[in-house]
């Protein structure tokens, strides 16, 4: 019990305290979450991706194994969500909600700091690969799911082209493989911007929960949370063997797979008017429930 309490106090409580501070300050000053999240998305996150992947000397095999692992987790959980929708004959909009909240998890705002606090900076580098993969899928597959075919594949690709962390990933791979290094003034600039990512993400997490709704469909809430918090990490244990993930890569991959539903799923649902109140409810409840599954998981992985 003391170990579980220690994990909560040292690895999880700082996350909720910073997110809570973001929530309170946002309420007080009426801060728009979108403007802050765009700063994180377009400026801070790409610098963090580049810094972590170049400084931690990950090999090409490390990078592509984690990307494949994260993509397969998303594919399998999505297939499970479709299966559940078909078996229980759920409405199309409810199936879309379950897809959005099971395929896409909060691997950035929540997963990155938790990996850092629980397993250290090397695990954070592996978790960053999972984060980038999840965001790429969200900006392509997520758009298609949310629009249910109303958005063209071309538009999805255009959104992907605007995704800066994709370029940071490619640049980091090139710099690592060719042993290049940025000039020292640029190194310091990129490092400082990257260091701002995690605290900013946690503030954004709190800001975005200002729009949380307390109403929801019980079936969607149940299925989404079971798949996201229980089934997904169970799958990850088996897929780690398939992809040969060991050590900190295994810790990071399994922990990222167990994250609650992505706050970005709420943004997609709002943009395409796919029951945004229900999606907000699923995201909020999965985040509140997540310590019950994540604390024992971190203890086991240690």
Image: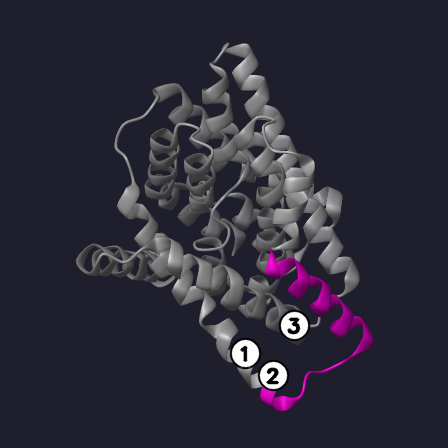
Q: Secondary structure at mark 2?
A: helix
Write down the residue under mark 3: 56
> Disc 1 to disc 3, how far (Cα)?
13 Å
| Residue 181 on image: x %, y % | 72, 83
Q: Secondary structure at mark 3?
A: loop
Q: Is residue 176 magenta?
A: yes
Q: Secondary structure at mark 1?
A: helix
Write down the residue under mark 1: 191
Residue 286: quarter of image: top left
Q: How many discs appear?
A: 3
Residue 28: quarter of image: bottom left
What's the residue at 65%, 65% (across, down)? 168
> Disc 1 to disc 2, how far (Cα)?
6 Å
> Disc 3 to disc 2, how far (Cα)?
14 Å
Which one is earlier in the sequence, the residue at label 3 or at label 2? 3
What's the residue at 61%, 41% (across, down)? 236
User: Which stretch is magenta?
Assistant: 163-186
| Residue 272 on image: x %, y % | 47, 33
């Amino acid at each position: 019990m003391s170990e579980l309490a220690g994990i909560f106090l040292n690895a999880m409580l700082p996350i909720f305290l910073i997110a809570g501070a973001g929530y309170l300050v946002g309420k007080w000053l009426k801060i728009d979450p979108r403007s802050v999240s765009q700063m994180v998305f377009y400026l801070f996150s790409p610098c963090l991706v580049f810094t972590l992947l170049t400084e931690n000397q990950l090999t090409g095999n490390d990078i592509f194994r984690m990307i494949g692992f994260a993509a397969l987790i998303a594919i399998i959980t999505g297939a499970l969500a479709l299966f559940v929708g078909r078996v229980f004959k759920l409405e199309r909009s409810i199936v879309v909600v379950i897809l959005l909240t099971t395929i896409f998890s909060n691997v950035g705002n929540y997963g990155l700091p938790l990996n850092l606090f629980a397993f250290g900076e090397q695990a954070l580098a592996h978790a960053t690969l999972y984060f980038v993969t999840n965001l790429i899928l969200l900006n392509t597959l997520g758009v298609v799911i949310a629009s249910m075919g109303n958005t063209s594949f071309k538009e999805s690709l255009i959104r992907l082209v605007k995704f800066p962390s994709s370029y940071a990933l490619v640049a980091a791979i090139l710099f690592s493989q060719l042993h290049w290094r940025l000039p020292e003034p640029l190194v310091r600039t990129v490092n400082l911007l990257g260091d701002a990512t995690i605290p900013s993400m946690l503030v954004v997490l709190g800001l975005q929960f200002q729009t949380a709704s307390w109403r929801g469909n019980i079936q969607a809430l149940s299925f989404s949370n079971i798949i996201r918090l229980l089934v997904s990490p169970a799958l990850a244990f088996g897929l780690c063997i398939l992809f040969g993930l060991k050590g900190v890569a295994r810790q990071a991959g399994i922990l990222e797979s167990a994250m609650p539903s992505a706050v970005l799923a709420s943004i997609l649902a709002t943009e395409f008017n796919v029951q945004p109140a229900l999606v907000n409810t699923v995201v909020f409840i999965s985040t509140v429930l997540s310590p019950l599954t994540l604390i024992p998981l971190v203890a086991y992985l240690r």
